[in-house]
Image: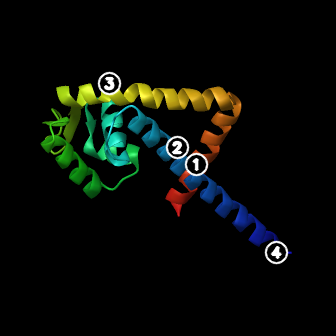
Amino acid sequence: MNIMGNKENRIQDLFRHLLKVRMGLRQVIMRELRGEGVEMNFETLQVLNRVRQTPGITQQGLAEMTVRDKSSITSLVNKLERGGLVTRTGDEEDRRNKRLYLSEEGERLAETFKPVIDRVYEEIHSRMGCEKETELCIEYLNRMYEVLESM
């Protein structure tokens, strides 16, 4: 039996499970939003929710927090700005950076999806609990990301 092959398979299994969990979360959130009459794609939801959580976030920061490249964030933010959901303002310290905020319309939309997202995470927490395991998992995944970044 090849021990290294088993280790590689376990790491591959881990990544497959991470993707599976991500897709499952995405499906549950989108199903719950549709049930509340909120129609938007997941990428829009992620961006609006992050800007809601972090008013004044830069586009670079938004790209990092949503794990997207700068060009796709720029395109999405342009679309949201044209749709009247976000505003961009110049950074006082560095004019090259743009700070993002929800517009009044964006705030109204956020008030419709925030309770749904909160409810999904609360349900997961109530079924899983596992505070200690959650912290250990976050630490392990952060270490794994550091390894990937160093490669």
Query: Mark 1 and mark 3: span between their CA atoms?
Result: 26 Å
Label 2 Cα neighbours within 10 Å, binned few <14 / some 14-19 / many ≥20? some
Where residue 109 appears, as percent x and y from the top left, is: 27, 30
Give the residue displayed 35% in from the left and 36% down from the top: 50
Of mark 1 and mark 4, the one earlier in the sequence is 4
Of mark 4 and mark 3, the one earlier in the sequence is 4
Nearer the camera: disc 1 or disc 4: 1
Q: Horizontal placement of 105 versus 38: left or right?
A: left
Q: For numbered disc 3, what is the local secondary structure?
A: helix
Label 4 Cα neighbours within 10 Å, binned few <14 / some 14-19 / many ≥20? few
**Residue that numbered label 4 is attached to:** 2
Label 3 Cα neighbours within 10 Å, binned few <14 / some 14-19 / many ≥20? few
Of mark 2 and mark 3, the one earlier in the sequence is 2
Q: Amino acid at mark 3?
A: Glu
Q: Residue placed farthest to the bottom in the image?
A: 1
Of mark 2 and mark 4, the one earlier in the sequence is 4
Please tell me whether residue 42 is drawn above or below residue 129 in the rendered image.
Answer: below
Nearer the camera: disc 4 or disc 3: 3
**Residue that numbered label 2 is attached to:** 25
Q: Quadrant of residue 14?
A: bottom right
Q: Amino acid at mark 1?
A: Val
Q: What numbered label is drawn on residue 111? A: 3
Query: Mark 2 and mark 3: span between their CA atoms?
Result: 20 Å
Q: Amino acid at mark 4?
A: Asn
The answer to whether marks 2 and 4 mark residues whose Cβ atoms lie closer than 8 Å is: no
Closest to the observer, 73 or 37: 37
